[in-house]
Image (cartoon, rainbow, N blue to C red):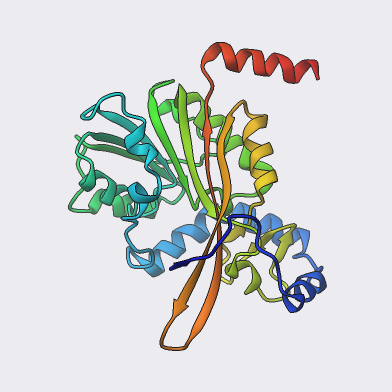
């Protein structure tokens, strides 16, 4: 991937803007409800079809999120992390291999994905605890002690959840995160190439689309994400677009990728309380 200058929102070409403007027809309410009710089944089928081969192992995690190391008070400090939405472990296992002083909690919506993680040769109950969880309704406190996690990673997960339920995920995570510690977020940004590829009839709502396999994807703006986190009591540390250009040299294709990379902190108790009081007074 070749970095592109600037970290602002991507500017559409006139042709792209015209095509998006024409795509106004939304998927029917009946079908949208069906997609919501069958979300777990659709992700389970996704992992059945693709096994552990679809996503590449994410060795870039420690490289792009240096906070995983920076949040240590001393070099060999043991960290407890939560990977919310772990899939089949493409991020989890490289991380455990690269850093021996990490204990990881990891969960996923798909029971099949969780089983793949547990069958991985690198899986060890001494290093991690993996469990199935619907982050919008299953209480994380059933598997993780309150205020016990140093870092939560939320990487290409929130985009798969209906925008009306995203706040429930952030509320759930908030309970297990230590005060002063952070959520590291990375997901699809507005006008990413994947958003522009959707055909007519795929639109569920503003910046929200359904793929052919029934899984869904939301494309975030800085403003939407910031409001989402702040409404649940988090403090914004970093929230910015990251633009990349994927180059296919064989076909001489240049594909614009847009991601949102962010860091939000759970305030220390007194700061958080004052912030909530201020919000109520406003």
Residue 75 in the figure: left or right of residue 88: left
Query: Percent x, y for residue 94?
Result: 27, 51
- 131 versus 279 height, above or below: below
Q: How many marks?
A: 0
Comparing 180 with 85, the one in front is 180
Query: In which quadrant of the rendered view does residue 281 lie?
Result: top right
Q: Residue at x 34, y 64 (%)?
A: 56
Image quadrant where one finds the C terminus: top right
Q: Looking at the image, which residue sits at the far front?
A: 5
Query: Percent x, y for residue 251?
Result: 46, 88
Q: Is residue 56 visible?
A: yes
Q: Residue at x 59, y 70 (%)?
A: 193
Query: Percent x, y for residue 58?
Result: 34, 56
Q: Looking at the image, which residue sits at the far top?
A: 270
Image quadrant where one finds the N terminus: bottom left
Query: Percent x, y for residue 164?
Result: 69, 44
Query: In which quadrant of the rendered view does residue 17 lie?
Result: bottom right
- 48 versus 186 height, above or below: below
């Amino acid at each position: 991937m070749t970095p592109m200058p600037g970290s602002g929102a991507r500017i559409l070409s006139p042709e792209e803007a015209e095509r998006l403007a024409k795509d106004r027809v939304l998927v029917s309410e009946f079908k949208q409800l069906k997609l919501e009710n069958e979300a777990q089944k659709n992700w389970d089928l996704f992992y059945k079809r693709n096994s552990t081969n679809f996503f590449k192992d994410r060795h870039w995690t420690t490289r792009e999120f240096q906070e995983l190391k920076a949040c240590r008070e001393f070099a060999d400090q043991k960290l407890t992390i939560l990977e919310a939405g772990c899939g089949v472990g493409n991020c989890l296992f490289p991380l455990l291999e690269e850093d021996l002083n990490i204990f990881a909690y990891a969960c996923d919506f798909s029971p099949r994905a969780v089983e793949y993680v547990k069958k991985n040769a690198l899986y060890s109950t001494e290093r991690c605890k993996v469990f199935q969880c619907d982050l919008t309704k299953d209480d994380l406190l059933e598997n993780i002690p309150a205020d016990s996690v140093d870092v939560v990673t939320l990487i290409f997960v929130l985009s798969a959840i209906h925008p009306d339920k995203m706040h429930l995920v952030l509320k759930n995570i908030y309970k297990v995160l230590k005060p002063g510690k952070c959520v590291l977020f990375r997901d699809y940004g507005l006008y990413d190439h994947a958003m522009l590829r959707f055909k007519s009839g795929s639109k569920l709502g503003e910046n929200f689309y359904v793929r052919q396999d029934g899984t869904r994807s939301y494309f975030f703006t800085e403003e939407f994400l910031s409001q989402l986190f702040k409404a649940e009591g988090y403090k914004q540390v970093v929230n910015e677009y990251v633009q990349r250009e994927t180059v296919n040299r064989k076909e001489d294709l240049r594909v614009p990728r847009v991601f949102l990379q962010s860091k939000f902190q759970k305030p220390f108790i007194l700061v958080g309380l004052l912030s909530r009081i201020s919000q109520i007074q406003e």
